[in-house]
């Protein structure tokens, strides 16, 4: 990366040692500039929005520490981009120059079969796709950061607060094939969910989902006739939660083939076991929705990634448990 500053005296060259992909020393003529303006030192030619995304993603460091965009830099300070952030920035979809904020923080490839499929990990709080009127970067806008110059299309979505796997088709043929496999129940999506109450036995939620013009979907009395949108629920672990009223919580495994919007959340709530942290379908909203797309399986491709819940390590569970 060229770290020279246009129209200014030559700053010290970029350093690529340690955990930073690019860095530069603030020259005297940049003293007092806002950080989002001074980022031209390490993001030459990038637009203001690309710079804004960079510090929002936590990829920008001043003397090794994150700083807000309004921070005024001083001569001699070192501006740096995290190596991971710089890698993520290769492939913005809005016409701007690549910048490290282009890919939301925490999004990463967790599995790939060349020319067929791949899977990305999406943290909770990140949009799967861009939604009009809702700020923030989305995964689908930045697929080019991971597969520059190649076909790449999301073929499943996750709710904003839900974490886990997003499936990516790496060809037009595979994108169409994925839909066919879903209709044949040949795609299995396994979720981990922490729900209210004790779940002693496995059960199946069969009610059809009415999602027409509703913020919260409705579970109908009539069963989904195809079976593709049934939710199979199995208890995995009883969990004691002192801060919860009632009989505690249960970690459950949920399996679906072709999900509808909010399907698992609505089905579990209708069964009397809403997901913890789900204020839309349950009684208590929280800082985290305990719903995670853990594993994706289809012919010739499989990917898995455990959730980043603080309690997960204490439970001693691994991929084999799901």
Image (tube, grey):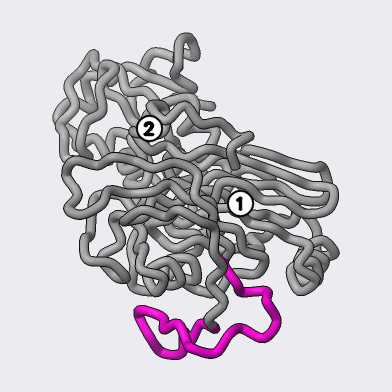
The C terminus, quarter of image:
top right
Residues in magenta, as a range: 208-231
Q: What element carries label 1?
A: helix
Which numbered disc covers residue 143? 1
Nearer to me, 170 or 268: 268
Q: Can residue 306 be seen in this view?
A: yes
Asked whether residue 222 is drawn in magenta, I would say: yes
Is 1 placed left or right of 213 in the picture? right
The reply to whether the C-beta atoms of the residues labelled 1 and 2 are less than 8 Å apart is no
Q: State which tag comes first along the sequence, 1 or 2.
A: 2
Residue 151 higher or lower than 211, as above or below? above
As rendered, which of 275 and 1 lies closer to the eye?
275
User: Disc 1 versus disc 2: distance between alpha carbons?
Assistant: 19 Å
> Crowding near pointer 1: few (<14 within 10 Å), some, many (20+)?
many
Pinpoint residue 65: horizontal percent, then vertical percent.
25, 22
Which residue appears at 24% of the width and 42% of the height? 241
Identify the residue under disc 2.
59
| Residue drawn 67% across the image and 65% down it | 257
Residue 52, position in %: x, y? 32, 46
Q: In which quarter of the image is residue 43?
A: top left
């Amino acid at each position: 990366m060229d770290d020279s500053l246009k129209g200014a005296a030559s700053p010290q060259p970029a350093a690529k040692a340690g955990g930073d992909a690019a860095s530069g020393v603030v020259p005297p003529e940049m003293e007092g500039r806002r950080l989002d303006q001074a980022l031209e030192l390490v993001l030459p030619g990038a637009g203001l929005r690309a710079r804004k995304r960079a510090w929002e993603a936590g990829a920008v460091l001043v003397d090794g520490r994150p700083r807000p965009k309004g921070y005024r830099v001083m001569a001699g300070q070192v501006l740096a981009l995290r190596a991971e952030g710089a890698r993520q920035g290769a492939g913005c979809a809005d016409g701007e120059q690549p910048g490290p904020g282009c890919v939301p923080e925490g999004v990463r490839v967790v599995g790939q079969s060349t020319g067929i499929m791949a899977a990305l990990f999406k943290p909770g709080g990140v949009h799967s796709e861009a939604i009009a009127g809702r700020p923030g970067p989305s995964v689908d806008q930045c697929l080019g950061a991971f597969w520059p110059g190649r076909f790449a299309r999301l073929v499943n979505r996750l709710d904003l607060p839900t974490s886990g796997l997003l499936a990516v088709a790496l060809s037009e043929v595979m994108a169409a094939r994925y839909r066919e496999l879903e209709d044949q129940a040949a795609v299995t999506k396994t979720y981990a969910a922490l729900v209210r109450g004790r779940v002693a036995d496995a059960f199946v939620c069969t009610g059809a989902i009415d999602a027409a013009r509703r913020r919260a979907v409705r579970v109908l009395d009539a069963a989904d006739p195809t079976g593709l949108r049934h939710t199979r629920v199995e208890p995995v672990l009883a969990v004691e939660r002192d801060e919860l009223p009632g009989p505690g919580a249960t970690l459950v495994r949920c399996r679906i083939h072709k999900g509808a919007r909010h399907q698992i959340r609505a089905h579990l709530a209708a069964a009397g076991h809403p997901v913890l942290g789900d204020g839309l379908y349950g009684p208590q909203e929280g800082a985290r929705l305990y719903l995670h797309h853990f594993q994706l399986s289809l012919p010739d491709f499989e990917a898995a990634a455990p959730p980043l819940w603080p309690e997960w390590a204490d439970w001693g569970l691994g991929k084999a448990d799901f």
